[in-house]
Image: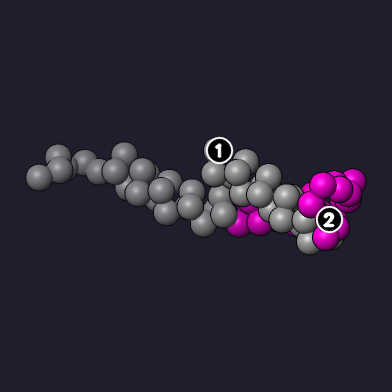
Amino acid sequence: NSVVFGVFSNTQRFLSQHRCREPEASPPRTLSDLLLASMVAGVVSVGLGGPVDLIKIRLQMQTQPFR
């Protein structure tokens, strides 16, 4: 969860910095910025969470002890 929230906030910061070139000015976040940041965070979440869940499920389904 911390990775997802970190990617989401960093993506929002990146988009706002490139929308407004002045670092002290913070433009209002638009719906498209939120959508893009959410999509990037979702892709990272699936990319990291999928293989971890697959390994976890395979270990839970294992019937023989690990040697």
* Mark 2 and mark 1: Cα distance apart in space: 31 Å
Q: Quadrant of residue 66?
A: top left
Residue 3 x/y as whole percent:
54, 44
Q: Residue visible at 55% across and 38% down?
A: 2
> What percent of the width, then of the height, locates residue 47?
51, 57
The residue range painted magenta reads: 20-43
Question: How far across and down, in percent of the image, does residue 45 sit?
Answer: 56, 50
**Residue nearest the viewer, comparing 7 with 25:** 25
Q: Which residue is mark 2?
A: 22
Name the amino acid, label 1.
Answer: Asn
* Residue named by callout 1: 1
Residue 22 rendering spot, x and y as whole percentages? 83, 55
Residue type, label 2: Glu
Q: Nearer the viewer, residue 24 or 43?
A: 24
Picture quarter with the C terminus? top left
In the displayed structure image, the side of residue 1 where residue 67 appears, left or right: left
Residue at 77%, 56% in the rendered image: 17
Q: Secondary structure at mark 1?
A: loop
Q: Nearer the viewer, mark 2 or mark 1?
A: 2
Is 38 or 9 nearer to us in this picture? 9
Few, some or many residues within 10 Å of mark 2 (<14, 14–19, 20+): few
Q: Is residue 30 magenta?
A: yes
